[in-house]
Each structure stands twice: as C-alpha cells, then as structure tokens.
Image (spheres, rainbow, N blue to C red):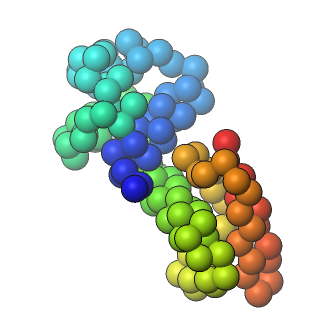
C-alpha cells in the first residue's frame, strides 16, 4: 500500500537536506515542535494544510512545488506497484509526460522498465 504521508515526509526531508538544514532549524522557523516535524518527515503523522504551509515557508519552497514532487513520486510508485502485479500493462498516457523528471523512493528493489512509444525509462529503487 502506498501511503501519501510517507511520500510527503520523504519529499520534505529531501528538501530540508538539500538546503543543508537541521530539523531543529526548520522546526524553529516553522514554529512546530521538533518531534512533530520528525514524525511528519518519517510519515508517521498526517500534516495539516496549515502545518504544510508553515513548513514550506520555513523551507522557502512553494507548496505547489512540494505537492508536484509528491504527485510525481506517487505516480511512479503506482506504476511500479502495477508493473509488479501485471508487467505487460502499458503506461497510461496521463503519466507519460512525468516519466523523465522524477526521482524514485520506495520502489520495490527489483528493476522495472516502463516503455512508452518514444521513450524507455528504467525505474530503479533508490
């Protein structure tokens, strides 16, 4: 099962780490407890829209950018999950534009190749 809160936490953690910032720094800027922010990053707590807004402000990241990255990861996780179940199923047209620009986290350890008419993309667990 794919958990949205886990994908969201992974993206938030990567954003924070890209900036070289600590949980303490971001939690202080966002005015949220360090423990709660840690639980959100680990996918153990569901973050409210108000909390996500505060975290995005603290990270100086647009919420739309955060959600786009989460959406891309969710699409790839769903593709990997369906490919593992039915390997001959074609890639849906709505997903094809996203295939070239997304990092993958939480994909099963086996390698999955997704082929579209003009491209072939290898999805490998990080």
Find the residue positioned furthest to the top: 24
- 47, 66: nearer the viewer: 47
**Placement of the N terminus among the 4 image quadrants:** bottom left
Residue 57 vs 96, above or below: the answer is: above
Residue 78: percent from the left, percent from the top? 50, 65
Residue 113 seen anywhere in this rendered image of the structure = yes
Between residues 81 and 10, which one lies in front from this camera angle?
81
Horizontal and vertical percent position of residue 49: 22, 46
Please tell me whether residue 1 is drawn above or below residue 87 in the rendered image. above
Quadrant of the frame with the C terminus: top right
> Seen from this angle, which residue lies furthest front?
85
Give the residue at x 24% y 41%: 46
Q: Residue at x 74, y 67 (%)?
A: 113
Say which quarter of the image contains residue 5.
top left
In the image, is residue 37 above or below residue 90? above
Residue 79 visible, this angle: no
How far across and down, in percent of the image, does residue 31 sit?
A: 23, 21
Against 107, is 60 above or below?
above
Q: Nearer the viewer, residue 43 or 62?
A: 43
Left or right, 83 with respect to 11, comes to right
Quarter of the image where one finds residue 44: top left
Residue 111 position in % (x across, y down): 73, 57
Count numbered badges in the picture.
0
Residue ID at (67%, 82%):
88
In this picture, residue 66 sits left or right of residue 121:
left
Give the side of residue 91 with respect to residue 60, left or right. Answer: right
């Amino acid at each position: 099962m794919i958990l949205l809160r886990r994908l969201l936490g992974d993206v938030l953690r990567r954003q924070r780490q890209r900036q070289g910032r600590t949980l303490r720094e971001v939690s202080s800027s966002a005015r949220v407890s360090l423990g709660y922010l840690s639980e959100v990053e680990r996918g153990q707590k569901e973050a409210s829209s108000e909390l996500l807004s505060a975290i995005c402000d603290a990270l100086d990241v647009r919420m739309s950018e955060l959600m786009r990255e989460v959406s891309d990861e969710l699409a790839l996780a769903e593709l990997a999950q369906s490919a593992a179940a039915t390997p001959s199923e074609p890639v849906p047209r709505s997903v094809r534009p996203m295939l070239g620009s997304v990092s993958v986290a939480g994909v099963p350890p086996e390698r999955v190749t997704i082929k579209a008419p003009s491209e072939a993309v290898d999805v490998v667990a990080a």
